[in-house]
């Protein structure tokens, strides 16, 4: 008598490899998670925290000229929109921020004293009818420049981060030219 070994079951064409089954289950789940994340990212409002501005010497910040200018400023300077300020906000100040949470804001301050370094030999830039004196942050390792209006009844400073382009200065110049009359320059004498 011979005993036959049981023959292995023939592989059925219905049987699937475990990797194919895992992929078939995981792919729709991953796609669903991706759609949900994308929807939340697109529809969710990214809320940038209010900008904190420290106090600076601005003796004319509450003057009628500064109030007039702040009322005349647009909601946006280029791609930067008006930002909320941390309370208590300094008088005569406004900030504009990009849509992201990491880029530096543009800060406008009105009513400042004559900027240090502005003397009769200073180079000026005229932008849309407004004369500006630039103080670059490059000498101190800051990737920003502060531009001061020097031909208006009050000094206005606009600090712009590097890479912000010319549009914020152009937009601010338009508002300043429309809100404040042009006056004679008052530079410091050479020392």
Image (cartoon, helix red, strand yellow):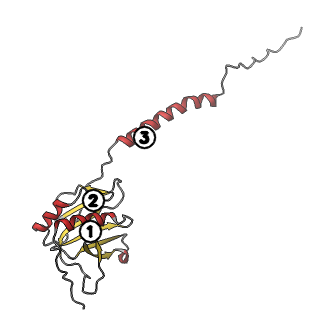
Where is residue 115 drawn, in percent x and y?
A: 23, 78
Q: Element under label 1? A: strand
Query: Which of pointers 3 and 2 lies earlier in the amino acid sequence?
Result: 3
Q: Quadrant of the N terminus?
A: top right
Residue farthest toward the bottom in the current orientation of the protein: 191
Vertical position of residue 17 compared to residue 86: above or below: above
Where is residue 63 drawn, in percent x and y?
A: 10, 68
Task: Work out how far the residue at label 1 is from the one at label 2, CA to CA, in angstroms.
Answer: 10 Å
- Residue 51 is tagged as none
Residue on which disc 1 sits = 158
Task: Work out how far the residue at label 3 is from the one at label 2, CA to CA, in angstroms.
Answer: 27 Å
Residue on which disc 2 sits = 96
Left or right position of 86 against 2: left
Q: Residue at x 77, y 18 (%)?
A: 8
Residue on which disc 3 sits = 38
Where is residue 191 drawn, in percent x and y?
A: 24, 91
Pointer 3 and pointer 2: residues touching (CB < 8 Å)?
no
């Amino acid at each position: 008598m011979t005993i036959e070994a049981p023959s292995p079951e023939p592989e059925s064409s219905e049987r699937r490899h475990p990797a194919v089954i895992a992929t078939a289950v995981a792919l729709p789940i991953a796609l669903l998670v991706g759609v949900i994340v994308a929807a939340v990212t697109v529809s969710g409002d990214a809320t940038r925290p209010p900008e904190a501005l420290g106090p600076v010497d601005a003796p004319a910040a509450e003057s009628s000229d500064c109030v007039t200018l702040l009322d005349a400023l647009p909601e946006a300077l280029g791609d930067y929109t008006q930002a909320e300020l941390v309370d208590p906000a300094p008088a005569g100040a406004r900030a504009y921020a990009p849509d992201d949470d990491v880029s530096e804001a543009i800060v406008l301050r009105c009513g400042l004293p004559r900027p240090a370094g502005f003397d009769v030999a200073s180079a000026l830039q005229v932008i849309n009818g407004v004369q500006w004196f630039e103080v670059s942050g490059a000498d101190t390792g800051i990737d920003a420049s502060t531009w001061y209006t020097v031909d208006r009844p009050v000094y206005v400073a606009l600090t712009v981060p590097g890479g912000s382009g010319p549009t914020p200065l152009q937009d601010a110049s338009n508002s300043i030219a429309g809100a404040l009359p042009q006056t004679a320059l008052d530079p410091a004498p050479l020392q």
